[in-house]
Image: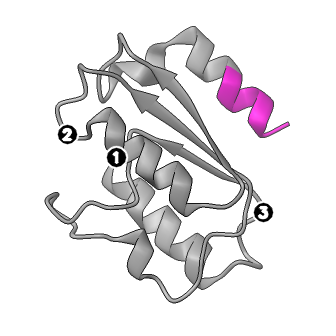
Amino acid sequence: MSTGGSIAQQLAADHPATVRRLGLISTAGRCASAEDGFDLAGCSSAVRAPTLLVGAGGRDRFYPAELFRQTVALIPDARLAYYPRRGHLSVCWDRRAQAVLAGFFR
């Protein structure tokens, strides 16, 4: 989640044999303006694992929806589950988001 998602993306890009599936919550692949300065586009290799990004909507104070869409575009086998009425943390408590994540990891 959030900055931890940047770390997970970097790990998945650098060590593709280690990551079989990648679940991301409220994070983005280009965080140059955020505290971590992460940019997935600058990684030497792409994330190869199937990826689910759970994104919050207009209530996410850290990542706008466009960053979620850009992130999914940077990962070949990624999809976005977007919850427009949720915030950066509150998306974690959304039962629909929880069900989508659980299904993704089954």
Marking on residue 20: 3
- Circle nearer the viewer, 1 or 2: 1
Task: Name the spot of residue 29 as percent of width and height, x first.
Answer: 40, 60
Amino acid, disc 1: Leu
| Residue 27 percent across, percent down from the top left | 38, 47
Residue most toward the bottom?
A: 44
- Residue 100: horizontal and vertical position, in percent? 68, 24
Q: Check disc 2 and give the amino acid type.
A: Phe
The residue depicted at 23 percent of the width and 19 percent of the height is 59
44 sits to left or right of 75: left
- In the rendered image, which residue does mark 2 sit on? 62
Distance between the Cα atoms at labels 3 and 1? 23 Å
Q: Is residue 57 above or below residue 85?
A: below
Point out the stretch of residues depicted in magenta. 100-106
Q: Which callout, 3 or 2, points at the residue further toward the start of the chain?
A: 3
What residue did someone put label 1 on?
A: 67
**Mark positioned earlier in the residue sequence (1 or 2):** 2
Considering only vertical position in the picture, is 59 above or below 78? above
Q: Single out the mark in the foreground, 3 or 2.
A: 2
Secondary structure category for the residue under label 3: loop
Q: How is the image coloured?
A: one colour
Mark toward the viewer: 3 or 1: 1
Out of 99 and 33, give the one closest to the viewer.
33
Left or right placement of residue 57 versus residue 73 in this view:
left
Left or right, 75 with respect to 55, comes to: right
Q: Amino acid at mark 3?
A: Arg
Q: Residue 34, can we see it?
A: yes
The local crowd at label 1, few if under 14, some if 14 to 19, many if 20 or more residues have their Cα within 10 Å, is: some
Q: What numbered label is drawn on residue 48?
A: none
Tell me the chief SS of the magenta region. helix
Lower sequence index among marks 3 and 1: 3
